Structures are given as C-alpha cells and as structure tokens.
Image (tube, rainbow, N blue to C red):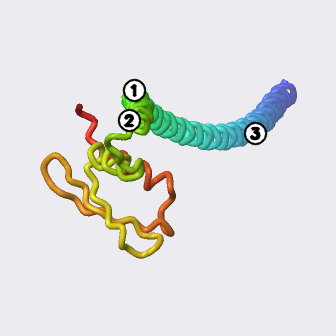
Amino acid sequence: MEAFRDMEDVSFWLLNLLGANRAETQQRKVLGRHEQMVERLLETQDGADQQLRETLAVEEEVARSLLELKECTSLGGTELQQLEVEIQKASKEDACVQARLCQLTTELQELREMEADLQRQEREMDEDTTITIPSAVYVAQLYHRISKIEWDYECEPGMIKGIHHGPTVAQPIHLDSAQLSQKFISDYLWSLVDTTW
C-alpha cells in the first residue's frame, strides 16, 4: 500500500509537473500571442499615424488651395467691380460724345447754311455791280468774324500762327504742321470757336 501511495504521490507530482509544464507552455503561447498582438497594435498604430499624417497633409493642401481660390475670387470680384465702374464711365463718356456730336452736327449744318447763304449773297453781289468786294477778302472777313482768329500771314512755311480773341482772353496760336496731324490742327482750331450764338 505504501508503494501504491508512493506511486500515487509520484503520479500526483508528475501530474503537477505536467500541469506546470502545460501552464508554462500555455503561458509561452499566451505571451507569444500577446507579443504578436502588441506588434500588430504597434503596426496598426504606425499605419494610423501614417494615414493621419497623409490626411493632415491633404487637408493642408486643400486648405491652401481653398485660400488661393478665395484670393482669386476676391481679386476677380475687385476686377469685376473696376470693369463695371469703367463701363459706367465709358457709357457716360459715350453719352457726352453723342451729345457733343449732335451739337457739332447742328453747328456744321448751320455753317453749311451760312456758307450757302454767303454764296447766294456773293452771287447777288456779283450780279449787283454797284459794290465790288473780292470774294477771298469777303470770305476771310467772314471767317475772322466767326472764328475771331487774327492770322499771322508772314510766319515760316509749315507754321500756323495767329491770335484767337476769345470771350475773355486773347490766346496765341502757334502750331507746327510738320509735327501735328491735320486732323489735330482742325479739331484744335474748331475747339476755339465759341458755340454760343
């Protein structure tokens, strides 16, 4: 019986030993799994950190693009406002030019009528031989009365000189036809003519 008891003790001790070995094996397995889980967790965390950095970089790029777009939109709005102001200004100038053109057309028509009237009077005067005035002198006197310009006929060739006797102040005229266009000279001289009749 004692041998049986010794055998039982040995069996119990072997079972404990085997149990301890299993526990250690299981503990190793659990520790191995734990290490794998920690490694996976660290890998997942590294991946998440990488994705977070990439997401932040993308968000930063999107924010930069949005700010640039807002700046471009703001500049475009400013340019649009400037264009609208310029369009309004051009419309006003166009209205002024149209009004001035109508006025000049009317004045031109009146001058043509006056010229026709003068030609008619010239013909009548030519028919009436009691007073004979050379037509060039008569036209020069008429132009002087209309334009109020006293010409300097002794100036150098290519120069246009004279004095315009305006409503308040006499103004000298000194133009070089070699440097200025005929249109500019004509427009300038017409601008001196008083339009109030």
Image quadrant of residue 43? top right
- Between 137 and 17, the residue placed more toward the observer is 137
Q: How many marks?
A: 3
N-terminal-most mark, 1 or 2? 1
The label number, if any, that marks residue 30 in the structure image:
none
Indicate the position of residue 95 as horizontal and vertical percent values.
Answer: 40, 26
Q: Are marks 2 and 3 in contact (CB under 8 Å)?
A: no
Residue 141 visible in the current orientation? yes
Q: Which mark's residue is nearer the viewer, 2 or 3? A: 2
Indicate the position of residue 4 as horizontal and vertical percent values.
Answer: 86, 25
How crowded pointer 1 is (Cα within 10 Å; few <14, some 14-19, many 20+) is rated as few
Q: CA distance from mark 3 to mark 1?
A: 102 Å
The label number, if any, that marks residue 106 in the structure image:
1
- Which amino acid lies under the numbered mark 1 shown in the image of this protein? Thr
Q: CA distance from mark 2 to mark 3?
A: 132 Å
Which residue is identified by label 3? 36
Question: At numbered mark 1, what does the secondary structure look like: helix, strand or loop?
Answer: helix
Indicate the position of residue 6 as horizontal and vertical percent values.
Answer: 82, 31
Which residue is identified by label 2? 128
